Image (cartoon, rainbow, N blue to C red):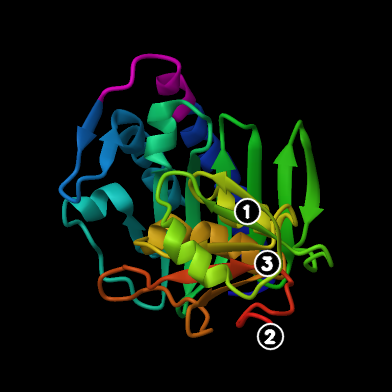
Amino acid sequence: MDTTTLNGLLEALIPIVRTAGQGIMDIYAGDIAVRTKSDSSPVTVADEYAESLILPGLQALDPWIPIVSEEQAEVGLLPETGQRFWLVDPLDGTKEFINRNGEFTVNVALIDAGEPVLGVVLAPALGRLFAGVRGHGAFIEENGTRRPISCRVAPEAGLTVVASRSHGDAHALEQFLAGRKVAAQTNAGSSLKLCLVAAGEADVYPRLGRTMEWDIAAGDAVLRAAGGRLLTLDSQPMQYGKTDFANPHFAAWGLAPDASRPSG
């Protein structure tokens, strides 16, 4: 797809994501009933309701693009994807949603030939929407305005590291950062971590634990559009459309010059 087509899809996608975000917030305002999925992760009615709003919207945009969505995948509903398909996580950061800290997101990405070429990440409780298109750049919408975002070069003082709030491995993180100059470390939930790197608010997000493609694809699209990279630990770009949709460990980088290796 060319950039004009992708931009058109993005502008049509944003209202779909915002509608899902409003549906989530309506549920967030009341009691939250939690169930446990087969992989022992939590799920709420908000996950399922958001998915029920997003999927018809995507089908209306283009009925020929297959959709892989987390909650449908959980019950075995996985279409043949081909070269181009949507990846949807209707509510990433369910633990953050349950804990009511606001750090949960709605995520939709378009994959083309293994690459996330378009992505939208909405944090409805925080009032922040991040979006990006391959070859066109990334932006944030907040407080009623839209402005461009881009990754930053890591400051001389050192890296700002953002780590998972709910899925941390302190020893693995310490090993990963050994030999790198670190100025600060912060925690955040859901795909917000990728967006913080994309917006130049952090320099690296190492993920040294289990994730699925729908967890990261939209944030990766924003990150790439903002000039960043999401690399496996052997310094290869993350690929999408894997047989089981499971990701290897990775690190998301801004414009840090030492993205693939520590100094020394």
Q: Mark 3 or mark 2, which is nearer to you?
A: 2
- Compared across the picture, whether 251 is left or right of 152 comes to left
Tell me where residue 180 sits by quadrant: bottom right
Q: Is residue 29 magenta?
A: yes
Q: Mark 3 or mark 1, which is nearer to you?
A: 1
Which residue is painted at 29% across and 29% down in the image? 45
Q: Which residue is mark 3?
A: 225
Specify whether residue 103 is in view. Answer: yes
Q: Please, which residue is most extreme toward the top here?
A: 30
Q: Which residue is mark 1?
A: 195
Q: Earlier in the sequence, mark 3 or mark 1?
A: 1
Q: Is residue 38 above or below residue 262?
A: above
Please tell me whether mark 2 sits on a helix, a strand or a loop.
loop
Name the amino acid type tagged 3.
Answer: Ala
Magenta span:
23-33
Name the amino acid type tagged 1.
Answer: Cys
Residue 186 location (% of width, % of height): 61, 47
Q: Residues within 10 Å of mark 1 (few under 14, many from 20)?
A: many
Q: Residues within 10 Å of mark 3 (few under 14, many from 20)?
A: many
Residue 126 location (% of width, % of height): 62, 32
Q: Is residue 140 above or below residue 81?
A: above
Q: Which residue is mark 2?
A: 264
Please tell me whether mark 1 sits on a helix, a strand or a loop.
helix
Q: Is residue 67 above or below residue 128?
A: below
**Of 54 and 96, which appears nearest the observer?**
96
Tell me where residue 8 sits by quadrant: bottom right
Which residue is painted at 41% across and 57% down in the image? 169
Which residue is painted at 49% across and 70% down in the image? 175
Residue 53 location (% of width, % of height): 40, 37
Q: CA distance from mark 3 to mark 1?
A: 11 Å
